[in-house]
Image: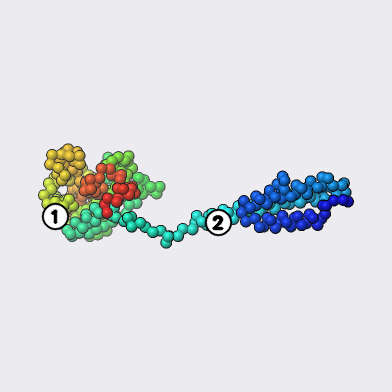
Amino acid sequence: MNSSITQAVIDSFKTEFETALTQAQSLDELELVRINFIGRKGKLGSVMGQLKVADLETKKTFGPILNTLKQSMQQAFNDRKDNLAQLARDSQDNQERFFDVTAYKPSAHHRGGLHPYTHVTNQIQNIFLSMGYQILDGPEVEDESINFEGLNIPKDHPARDMHDTFWLNLPGKLLRTHTSNIQVHTLKNRKPPFAVVAPGRCYRHEATDASHDYVFMQTEGFVVDKNISMAHLLETARKFLNALFGRKDLTVRLRPGYFPFVEPGVEIDIRCPFCTKGCSVCKKTCWIETAGAGLIHPNVLRYAGIDPDEYSGFAFGFGLSRLAILKYHIDDIRLLHTGKMEFLSQFG
Ligand code: DAH
């Protein structure tokens, strides 16, 4: 047997390969090991080449051994490759997951500011607080009975058509379509007299345009006591609107309007504070609608357990989004609900 292939040569070749595999620390290094050992021109190829020219005896002895070796080298290579690929993925994951919050240094120019809604809500609250009102809140996820029945809008009442409603997947639950729900909760749970103002978000399932959005804000307000009349409502509206627009002489007018929960019902308009002859804000009419209002309907008082022969009240619902738009000359309501910094940063 005249051959350089011996078991010792094969064993040391195998050890050399295994060492190279473990020393490869990256997929690139591993690729070099593959080329060097099991690639077409690699070391295994040259051992196989020696076998080809060896005598029959050697071929018989080492042929099967080398074939098995070839397979096990391929297998060991694949295992090491999987292993290194996994390590690479893990280390990338770790890099991505690691987020050092303390490393963030805000630029001196990024100053926070209040949203126009916050400005207007604060002003409205302060004006009504100065008139002795209390501020209340109510749920945005509401019962149908409170949002409608309690406000004298029974099922099949045509006024429901005005309230395109977001119904929830829970029976009888909806996103409130107006802040008037707070009236019902308060009337049910408190004993008059009271004067309440309640700003909040409302939802209507309707197409959006520059003056409509499916989410908007209203401010509900109501006073319940003995002998409350339209005169109280008119004077309250006058005081409030003048204070909000920083004026003393705004002309406020009441126009008949229909809302099922008030009788009589009115719309509160102001003479346009921005012009004398008509402008784009008042759409050349010189008048701007600001609210619906009226004397609380006896059915609403009765539903809440208050005797309408003993108590009366007025209620109003100002469009808070509308007031914000008017005050700040915003030409698209939808801007109020985006996070656009160019828009928001104007309000400081
Ligand atoms: N809830 C009414 C709406 O969303 C607004 C409103 C009108 C509120 C008259 C009132 C009111 O309290 O008296 O259209």
The secondary structure type at the circle numbered 1 is loop
Residue 282, numbered label: none
Residue 227, numbered label: 1
Q: Residue at x 36, y 45 (%)?
A: 167
Q: Quick one: label 2, few (<14), some, or many (20+) residues within 10 Å?
A: few
Q: Is residue 82 left or right of residue 123?
A: right
In the picture, residue 189 is in which quadrant?
A: bottom left
Which of the two labelled residues, at mark 2 and mark 1, occupies the earlier sequence position? 2
Q: Nearer the viewer, mark 2 or mark 1?
A: 2
Q: Is residue 262 left or right of residue 201?
A: left
Q: Three-letter amino acid code at disc 1? A: Asn
Q: Residue at x 26, y 47 (%)?
A: 321
Spot occupied by residue 206 in the image (x, y as percentages of width and height)? 32, 41
The secondary structure type at the circle numbered 2 is helix
* Closest to the observer, 330 or 62: 62
Q: Residue at x 20, y 50 (%)?
A: 316
Q: Three-letter amino acid code at disc 2? A: Ser
Evaluate if marks 2 and 1 touch, with contact meaning CB atoms under 8 Å apart: no
Residue 91, numbered label: 2
* Closest to the observer, 131 or 80: 80
Is residue 77 visible in the rendered image? The answer is yes
Q: Residue at x 71, y 56 (%)?
A: 18
